[in-house]
Image (spheres, grey):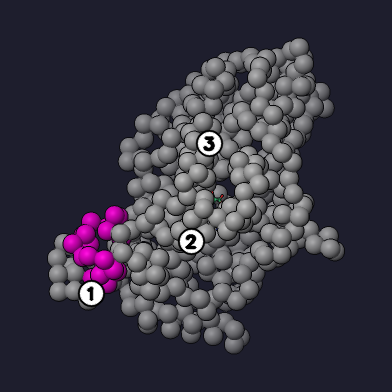
Amino acid sequence: MTAVLWLRRDLRRRDHPALLAARDAAGDGDLVVAFVVDPRLWGGAGPVRRAWLAANLRALDESLGGALTLLHGDPRTVMPALAGRVSATSVHVSRETTPAGLRRDGTVRDALGSGVEWVETGTPYAVGPGLVTNGSGEPYKVFTPFARAWRRHGWPDPAPTPRELPLRHARNDADATAALDAALSASDLPALPAAGEEAALRRFRAFRDDHLAGYDDDRDRPALDATSRMSPYLKLGVVHPRTLLAELGERSGTGADSFRTELAWREFYADVLHHNPRSAWHDLRPTLQGMRYDEPEDAVEAWTKGETGYPVVDAGMRQLLAEGWMHNRVRMITASFLTKDLHVWWPVGARHFLDHLADGDVASNNHGWQWVAGTGTDASPYFRVFNPVTQGEKFDPDGEYVRRWVPELRHLPGKAAHQPWEHADGYAHGYPQRIVDHAAERQEALDRLAAVKGR
Ligand code: FAD
């Protein structure tokens, strides 16, 4: 018997129900663990996510003793060819939950035909999307009741880590290994975190032991290294959220509680996407139908480069380019700036984030954008136009985050860094002038909303 495990968003050995199912199916036979570099997805991923994926595939290959089989091409042809080549009796996967993933898996399963069993086990979430419903069996539309029901639903303990695996390597496709090499040697890559399951757990345990107690207070402070930075690992399933929840154990207190709630946001957005596949790139709620948007090319370019003249916005956009990651509070501020100050439709910003974030994930990213833009799951958010100066002063009170990412403002002490226009030497080192007047654009955003509502 040969079982194939086809990996996608589950690049790990620990807490991997589909891996255990494949091992059991292999019995005394062989287990082939494969990853397919699909040019359609690979091309659209952008250099940062490609490099992050490549680094984690290499780390996983090492942890499998070099037995990861790397293939290249359209999974609809590659998977049946692999199954035929190794005489597979079953192909195992972790169940996909995104619209695109579900479509792809349906076609691959059909292409494998009835001679090869298709087995789905587990998902990339603690509670699989679609399983948390209200008393009438309907999905939740708002986060807080979802989070309560999600906790009530609960999740199993992590699956045991297999000691021995009957691994068989099935010859790499040279195009796949070349794609990984190219991704890892691309120029201008940001400084990505250490790849692999061990690195993820090391990072998480350091966060848990040093920062969890203060997480509830500190997680909104972008200058502090006070959040887990698990998002890039969760994105590729290098670590499973159930593992993190188990690592928290019985810990109580606001820090642990708040961390569980943040993980619930990830699960909520996956659930929303599961029930509303169109919301990936279309407004979830039609609240802003008929809204007039602008396409200010120069201003959008200034936003992408971190040259808007608003310090905390620019710091965030530069962090994104430098690290392939941005602090959550600053994701909200920069998204608000693009949608409310520049009046740009949210998918433009969502696309840019996906192109540059190592954790770029359609469910979390695009619903995060819609939450800010006012078309998402929040009840009445459009009136919340973030003021980039007061937000900066509140969450970066010493200006440390701004000075870290915007060298032109390093000469301004304390919170002065948030308002260079108030200081005679504010622009002495080449920092750009503000590209818009926030007060005027806030009013413009509210006027446009009033026009939509008055229709
Ligand atoms: P922590 O504070 O340590 O939180 C732990 C985990 O909880 C995170 O790793 C993440 O999986 C989850 N989480 C926390 N906050 C959120 C949230 N608001 N929504 C969904 N999950 C959350 N997250 C992504 O993983 N991928 C994205 O592409 C993404 N794009 C975003 C775009 C915008 C406009 C906004 C406002 C938020 C976005 N987020 C995204 C959510 C959040 O910013 C990141 O998950 C978080 O900053 C990751 O850092 P961390 O792992 O240190 O988070």
Q: Name the residue under label 2.
A: 217
Q: Where is residue 303 in the image (x, y as percent from the top left)?
A: 36, 62
Q: For this rendering, which residue is in front, 362 or 13? A: 13
- Residue, x 83% and y 60% (percent of image)? 137
Q: Position of residue 77 (x, y in %)?
A: 65, 28
Q: Name the residue under label 1.
A: 421
Above or below residue 309? Residue 214 is above
Q: Position of residue 319 (x, y in %)?
A: 36, 52
Report how far apart the C-alphas of labels 3 and 1 lie in the structure.
Answer: 44 Å
Q: For this rendering, which residue is in front, 70 or 331? A: 331
Question: Looking at the image, is mark 3 or mark 1 nearer the viewer?
Answer: 3
Q: Position of residue 272 (x, y in %)?
A: 68, 58
Q: Is residue 294 visible?
A: no
Q: Which amino acid does label 3 sit on?
A: Leu
Residue 415 is inside the magenta segment: yes
User: Which element carries disc 3, helix, strand or loop?
Assistant: helix
Query: Label 2 CB, ligand 1: below 8 Å?
Result: no
Above or below residue 161? Residue 366 is below
Report how far apart the C-alphas of labels 3 and 2 lie in the structure.
Answer: 23 Å
| Circle nearer the N terminus (2, 1) | 2
Query: Label 1 CB, ligand 1: below 8 Å?
Result: no
Q: Where on the picture, by quarter, is residue 163?
A: top right
Q: Can residue 283 be seen in this view?
A: yes
Q: Where on the picture, by quarter, is residue 271?
A: bottom right
Q: What residue type is labelled 1?
A: Trp
Label disc, if present, on residue 320 of the rendered structure: none
User: Which element carries disc 2, helix, strand or loop?
Assistant: helix
The magenta span reads 402-420
Q: Where on the picture, by quarter, is residue 364?
A: bottom right
Q: Mark 3 points at which residue?
A: 201
